[in-house]
Amino acid sequence: MLLAAKSSTALLSKHAPIGSGRSATNIRRAVIDSLGRRQNSVRALGSGNAIATATKGGIGHHFFSAIDGNHRGFRSSATACRMSIADTPLGKAKEGEQLLDGLDVYTVPSREDGHPLTVYGIGGDESEPTCEDHVLLMLHGRTWSSVPVYHLLGGPLNAEKGLESRSLMEALHDKNIRVYSMDFRGFGGTPADASGGVEPNRCMEDVESVLDWLAKRHGCKTPEKVSLMGWSQGALVAQLAAQRDKPLFSRLILYGSIFDPMVRFPRDPLYLRNPPEVEPLRNTFDAAIEDFTIEGTIPPKAATYFADAALLADPIKAQWKHMYQFNNCDPARVHVPTLVVVGDQDPYAPLHVQSTLFTNLGRGTDRTWSILSDADHAVHLLEGRSRFQSIVTSFIMNSKKIGKETVF
């Protein structure tokens, strides 16, 4: 089940990891020395910006880091030794360059333990981030990275090959939305931490770290123009973030949410002496392609491209744990303008459950429910995806603003 500057890409696979325990100066020196051997251009731009620019085989590479003097070493014992996208399957694979084409990649430290979180933005945007921008952060779901999910066949290289982009990031960027997506720990370009697992509350905290970084990047003193979208299981993470006392965003998009008030995840046993060892499971092509269920809604070649990209980014199935934390999802505690959007034939988000989600959202803010016909779980990748794009854009641009008393 599928659960989302200046360069073309930012791939770190052959360079010193940004955000390791080494000092920022040493990191810059290592990256610059490595790139210099290939006559790459270099520039130092300070915290939160590109620290190196390179070209290789026609693909531009930019390195970005939000790490400052307060985050030069990752302090948590829960953080693994692998400290950057360079140590992930997405960063190591040669084909990763093509998946990241058209994107800029940022390393953002978690506010909780400093773990490096990989964030993606559209490359080639010469405009400076400002507080007037409509900013959207997109969360992926249970199984696959944001790169194949939200940037399928995007970038200039695929365009040169005559391949039709199915990148939601590019489509929304073209509608004047500053789009970002991120990978949870252990997915795509974000390395796993030492726990080896993915848990809902940790994901929510990491989302807040990225939202905080986006607010600073765009100079936002209030979350008035910041939106958060979660797809499938990612919608549950987004909902948890919306239930906080002071959400760091003003609009919520629950896309294909798997929320179901009748599903209660069991808590973990407390006193096991011999807990079972969980063997890593490989993801499969069939699992990657199973969300496409309606004949004629996506060409076979495009579906195959998605499956191949998904397996490259996430060859090993991420291990979710402490799922009972999702039991805290309560629509009545959501008090920001909310869009509930779903395909009418989504097997994971049946309409009668979506109705329960929508009708129980907190009162006092705009609520919109949109059902797209002839669509299943992956609406944004299908032939009719322009309808989805228009609905999301309209909601972000036109929904009622939150009160001015809400500040970061």
Image (tube, grey):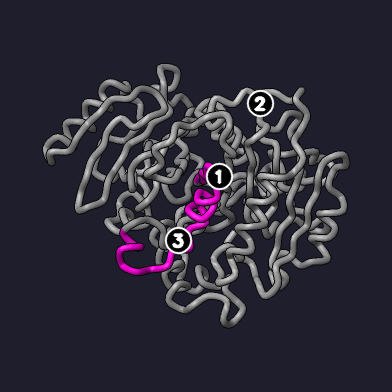
Q: Earlier in the sequence, mark 1 or mark 3?
A: 3
Q: Nearer the viewer, residue 109 or 395?
A: 395
Q: Eyeballing the image, is 177 above or below 73?
A: below
* Residue 112 visible somewhere in the drawing: no
Q: Note whether 164 is above or below 80 in the view shown.
A: below
CB atoms of marks 1 and 3 within 8 Å: no
| Residue pictured at 45% horizontal, 43% vertical | 121
| Residue nearest the viewer, comparing 213 with 382 | 382
Front residue of this view, candidates 171 and 57: 171
Q: Position of residue 389 (x, y in %)?
A: 60, 58
Q: Which residue is mark 3?
A: 152
Indicate which label's residue lies in the foreground, 1 or 3.
1
Q: Is residue 102 toward the left or the right of residue 183 in the image? A: left
Amino acid on which disc 2 is placed: Thr
Label 3 is placed on what type of residue? Leu
Nearer to us of marks 3 and 2 is 2
Q: Is residue 357 magenta?
A: no
Residue range in magenta is: 157-182
Circle 1 crowding by C-alpha within 10 Å: few under 14, some 14–19, many from 20? some
Label 2 SS: loop
Which residue position is annotated with label 1?
A: 177
* Residue type of the residue flagged with mark 1: Ile
Q: Any magenta on residue 168? A: yes
Q: Position of residue 82 (x, y in %)?
A: 37, 39
Neighbours of disc 3 within 10 Å: few (<14), some (14-19), many (20+): many
State the separation of the CA atoms marked 1 and 2.
17 Å
Q: Quadrant of residue 118?
A: top left
Q: Quadrant of the C terminus?
A: top right
Q: Position of residue 388 (x, y in %)?
A: 63, 61
